[in-house]
Amino acid sequence: MTPLAGSAPERARRWRRLVPLALLLSALALVWASGAHELLSLETLRRHRLVLLELVATRPLWSAVAFVLLYVATTALSIPGAVVLTLAGGFLFGTALATLLVVLGATAGAVLLFLVARTALAEPLRARAGPWLARMAEGFRKDAFSYLLVLRLVPLFPFWLVNLVPALLGVPLRTFALATAIGIVPGSLVYASVGAGLGALLERGEEPDLGLLLEPRILLPLLGLAALALLPVLWKRFGRSASERG
């Protein structure tokens, strides 16, 4: 087979890998061009809260499904507004159900973006980056669950970035999905509980404190959970070597 003939299927395969990314970017461009992202605001919730409450009361199942799908789209497209959506979920569905719906929607959206990045970007990046990326990826994968859990519990980096980087480093899908689902529960629970009591604030035209996660009463327990998540990593690094020396 000639090099030219052999390269044609490879080029076709590379273009096919880019299709999911192109669709995602096209959807994102459409959302921004239409201004639909501006609807994810507390003002929108305040203006339409009675209609939304009536819709949830009359069609609870379909309302829950629509909420999850909206959360999936928002997360996959990395559109700002996840906090507002979580507050709205607490307001419309109550703390417990809203937390469940948020975890389902956010995890599914994160997995979708993860898969798109892994399909379209991971292989070309590894081919261009060279051995240093392979070494970093190997180190991250060894304790991927612990690292991801910490990054989900304590929002040190943007949510979308934590969706992309593990895909580029070759983290297994199951590890990524499980760490995401577990790690976002505390933050989702906090904001959903605030949303459950949002009615009075909306009536007065006030807004909730969106910096809740940075308050010591919330942040310190999250840091404690993050420290627990890192214990297996620390044991591998220091505990074994100390016991072997002993």
Image (cartoon, rainbow, N blue to C red):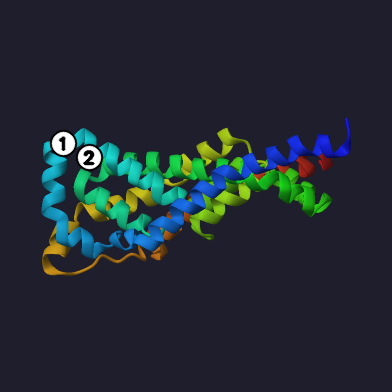
Residue identified by numbered label 1: 59
Apparent side of residue 242 relative to residue 101 in the rendered image (left or right)? right
Label 2 – label 1 distance at C-alpha: 6 Å
Q: Where is residue 86? Give x, y as percent.
A: 31, 52
Residue name at image x 75 percent, y 43 percent: 138
Q: Where is residue 18? Give x, y as percent.
A: 61, 45
Check the image and report above or below for 13 versus 150: above
Specify few, some or many for label 2: CA neighbours under 10 Å numbering under 14, 14-19, or 20 or more: some
Apparent side of residue 171 relative to residue 220 in the rendered image (left or right)? right
Q: Where is residue 240? Give x, y as percent.
A: 75, 40
Residue name at image x 19 percent, y 69 percent: 206
Residue name at image x 11 percent, y 64 percent: 203
Check the image and report above or below for 35 versus 142: below
The residue lying toward the viewer, choosing from 80 and 152, is 80
* Residue found at the very far top of the displayed protein: 1
Residue identified by numbered label 2: 63
The answer to whether residue 98 is seen in the rendering is yes
Q: CB under 8 Å between callouts 2 and 1?
A: yes
The residue lying toward the viewer, choosing from 215 and 240, is 215
What's the residue type where badge 2 is placed? Ser
The answer to whether residue 232 is seen in the rendering is no
Apparent side of residue 91 relative to residue 231 in the rendered image (left or right)? left
Q: Quadrant of the N terminus?
A: top right
